[in-house]
Image (spheres, rainbow, N blue to C red):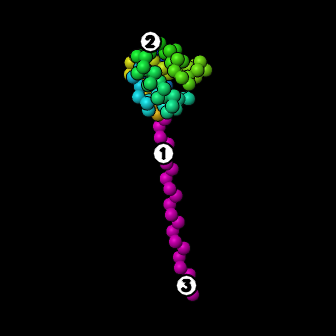
Amino acid sequence: MKRLMLAIVALAFSGFALATTNINSATLEQLQALPGIGPVKAQAIIDYRKANGKFKAVDEITKVKGIDTATFEKLKGELAISGKTTPPAEAPAAKAAPAPAAAAPAPAKTK
């Protein structure tokens, strides 16, 4: 029973860690969310896609100007050529600490 529960918990959390970007349909903003991909490289991916059609394999992204093998190696686990682009799960927002209560004004001195 414990193993089953551990497997379920592991699967639940693994879903949060998996993020994929479909390089055949991702928007400029979605491409820019990839590590090491800024607006220029994201636009280059879109331009390459328009000029050459859909990528047939994720490693074809190395044909895009500005994306070398080292960049691809960092990204390959996050890239896909089909399916929906799924953004990484965002970390829960840190709750703001409550503001300290304002100190009560000191009582006026009387003579």
Rendered image: mark on residue 110:
3
Disc 2 designates what residue?
A: 56
Q: Could you say which is closer to the camera, residue 28 or residue 18?
A: 28
Q: Is residue 27 left or right of residue 99?
A: left
Q: CA distance from mark 3 to mark 2?
A: 86 Å
Please name the residue shown 51% across and 50% down the image.
97
What residue type is disc 1 on?
A: Lys
What residue type is disc 2 on?
A: Lys
Instruction: Give the main secondary structure, helix, strand or loop, of the magenta stretch.
Output: loop
Which quadrant does the C terminus fall into?
A: bottom right
What residue range appears in magenta? Answer: 91-111
Q: Secondary structure at mark 1?
A: loop
Q: Secondary structure at mark 2?
A: loop
Q: Earlier in the sequence, mark 3 or mark 2?
A: 2
Q: Residues within 10 Å of mark 3 (few under 14, many from 20)?
A: few
Rendered image: mark on residue 95:
1
Q: Position of residue 46 (x, y in %)?
A: 44, 25
| In magenta stretch: residue 48 | no
Farthest top residue in view: 56
Q: Position of residue 43 (x, y in %)?
A: 46, 29
Whether residues under marks 3 and 2 lie with C-beta atoms below 8 angstroms apart, the answer is no
| In magenta stretch: residue 103 | yes
